[in-house]
Amino acid sequence: MEQNEQNIERSAGILLPVSSLPSPYGIGSFGKTAREWIDFLHKAGQSYWQILPLNPTSYGDSPYQSFSAFAGNPYFIDLDSLYEDGLLNKEEYTQTRWSRSKKRVDYSTLYQEREPVLRKAFSRFKNDKKLDEFIRNNKWFEHYSLFMVIKESHTLLPWMDWEKPLRIRDPHALEQIKKEQADNIRYHAFVQYQFDCQWNALRAYASTKNIRIIGDIPIYVSLDSADVWENHELFQLDEHNIPLEISGCPPDSFSEIGQIWGNPLYDWETIAKTGYKWWIQRIRRNFDWYDVLRLDHFRGLESYFAIPYGAKSAKGGRWRPGPGKEFIDMVGKAFPDANIIAEDLGFLTDEVRQLLAYSTYPGMKIIQYAFDDREVGDYIPHKYEANSIAYPGTHDNDTIRGWSRNAQRACIREAMDYIGVQHKKDLPRGMIQLAFESASNLAIIPMQDWLELGSHARLNTPSTVGGKNWRWRMRKKALKPELAEEIAKLTAMSNRTTRT
């Protein structure tokens, strides 16, 4: 099947997770500061805002480990908007100490304090017709709501540890839950309805400023999720719902033992027999949220690394064939006009490169990798092709400032010589300029790099859990008019301004 060329013109954008937006309530949200951020992007001549997955965070507070691939994160619901809608009183949320620091997300406090506030708002919500309409139009919600109310009644135990009737989704047991937990199920509907309403309003506002949203769809889902609980036959599980093998990546120059991600692996043969129904539903849900979709771990579609369940390292893993062109054809048929970016990082083979070429998706070029002697790929900027996305680094990389302090001296010197700067302090702007001047149609810069922040602002360190991961927040005072002017000037000089 012939694939459609991607419709991404020469332009620029900024990577900033919703969680990192300024907010007085512990985490970024869809409220006033999000609209101010969009105003900043507009003034800076940007065309794209790239975010991370919007799903609820679970294990390790990671947006890539969620209880649902369809639900939205309740933490992102703006409390001031609920107040304006008459659903909250000010004192019910303004007197809480949401975080110990404005520089970090405090997920523990959010977990303890956010739900009681949302339940107060729910108790005052009277628009039952809108809620009923939301439930009717979102078929995924029934299974997600059942999963959540059962999990909450079982002190958040994984579904694999529930009693058998609930674990195997016995219809009579589930009907009983629906009757007993009707109000709680409706509460979760209210939360997801508010999430969608607020996000849709914010996305519409972005559209008025000619800002498009790049979202992220993780290739894998969590074992402890509504997705696996509902569709266990689509995954490689044994008769006790234990994974046969799990996801990860092999040992390489970055890690001698490889990485164990722990997600259950898909049974691609069974998924193909269903016509990829679940995947089509999942991608459609994501395109309800985003204008452009970044497909995480693209190489896993050609072949994926499978690690025996319970292994202590990835050394005993093996490569197994993925769905390949059949998956690409499915996406092209179901979403013929879709814009998709392939996260084509990691161990790449000729077969992966051929699949990327077949898809016509633009791949990712990481400038830091061009000067990392552990990276075997070719990331040198003067070789970038137009159908690609240039990044100094992503959410999984150190900031440029941090990299310039922590990388091998020879790598730093190579970067300085290539860019033509005499001092390490000039590397952040130098790498940004490399991205902007490259042939890549799109250049995406993490906001931390525009702010020239060090490693304390790094968003995630792969193969680690907890700690500082996913916690960095931008200070409101960072959005200075002179920075917007500087970004707009460089954007225009590199012919990346797409609006008049």
Image: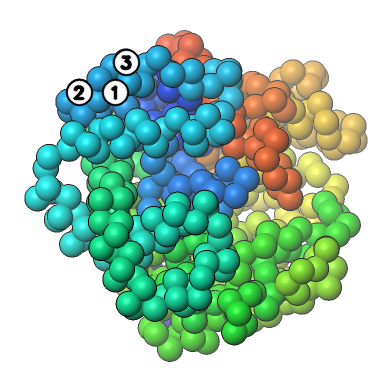
Element marked by disc 2: helix
* Mark 1: few/some/many CA within 10 Å (<14, 14-19, 20+): many
Q: Which one is in front, 53 or 418?
A: 53
Amino acid type, callout 1: Asp
Q: Which one is in front, 177 or 191?
A: 177
Element marked by disc 3: helix
Residue 169: give x, y in percent of width and height: 41, 75
What residue lies at 14% left-to-right and 55% top-to-bottom? 133
Amino acid type, callout 3: Glu
* Dot label at residue 80: 1
In this picture, is 261 found above or below 461? Answer: below
Mark 3, residue position: 91
Mark 2, residue position: 84
Whole-Å distance between the Cαs marked 1 and 3?
11 Å
Residue 130: give x, y in percent of width and height: 13, 48
Q: Nearer the viewer, mark 2 or mark 3?
A: 3
